[in-house]
Amino acid sequence: MSSAFAPNRFDGQVVIVTGAGSGIGRASAIRFASEGATVIASDVFQNRLDELKTDFPDLNIVTVAGDVSLEETAESLLATAGGRVDVLANVAGIMDAFIPLAEIDDATWERVFAVNLTSVMRLTRAVLPGMIEAGHGAIVNVSSEASLRASASGVAYTASKHAVNGLTKSVAVLYPGKRVRAVDQDGKLIDIL
């Protein structure tokens, strides 16, 4: 997104933002809604979504609490959006406590990958057909410094964020000519020509 505020930039558009209860997700949801979008805001914590609505009652924000790593949450988000999504912002993510490979347990590995990567795949898979049919759309996959170098976190988080970059690039390569855009962790546009 451009840093310049444009109040009508997203008028009439529907935007899904995951991880909208805090941090980058919350800021993204507020910004999209402030610029005219109907925002479908998702977070695993209902109280965070309630606070978002309370803090910004005049913005068009609809909340959906749920675990984005589950297919049912992806389905709920798409249903709440009415099947039409102009922008998908995959922001939700969790850390791994800087656990090195020799110490990582299966449960932590699987949970980090479920939230950081599988949710991105499921939601992207859910919105792509509608974007392709509409002839436009944007998918923003938030990655991390850890997607570029290993010293920023533990092994599960680092590997999952590297995978997010690969997924984003793969979407760009496998859907040419569809007028859908994908953005990588540096904010560089990867056009799906």
Image (spheres, rainbow, N blue to C red):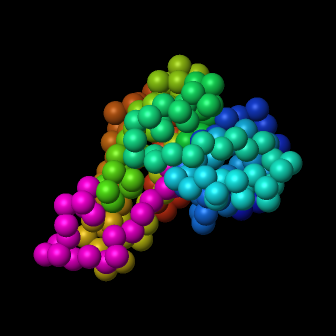
Give the side of residue 24 with respect to residue 168, left or right: right
Residue 129: image x %, image y %? 47, 24
User: In percent of the image, x 56 and y 52: which residue is there?
Assistant: 43
Between 69 and 27, which is closer to the camera in this rendering? 69
Left or right placement of residue 11 versus residue 189 in this view: right
Quarter of image, res 85: top right
For residue 137, above or below residue 49: above
Locate residue 173: give its quadrant: top left
Task: Give coordinates of residue 65: x percent, y percent.
Answer: 57, 46
Q: Nearer the viewer, residue 97 or 16?
A: 97
Q: Nearer the viewer, residue 2 or 52?
A: 52
**Residue 136, x across and y down, in percent:** 58, 30
Is residue 174 placed above or below 7 in the rendered structure? above
The reply, left or right, for residue 95 in relation to residue 90 is: left
Tell me, yes or no, if residue 150 can be seen here: no
Residue 124 lies, with reference to residue 30, above or below; the image says above
Image: magenta residue range: 90-110
Q: Where is residue 11 in the image (x, y as percent from the top left)?
A: 78, 37
Count of numbered circles on the image: 0
Q: Is residue 101 magenta?
A: yes
Residue found 40% across the figure and 36% down from its top: 71
Of 166 and 21, nearer the camera is: 21
Queried whether the magenta region covers residue 180, the answer comes back as no
The residue that appears at 47% across and 36% down in the rendered structure is 74
Q: Is residue 94 visible?
A: yes
- Residue 25's place in the image compared with 177, above or below, is below
Residue that appears at 40% across and 41% down: 70
Position of the N terminus, as image quadrant, is bottom right
Farthest front residue? 47
Give the side of residue 54 with respect to residue 25, left or right: right
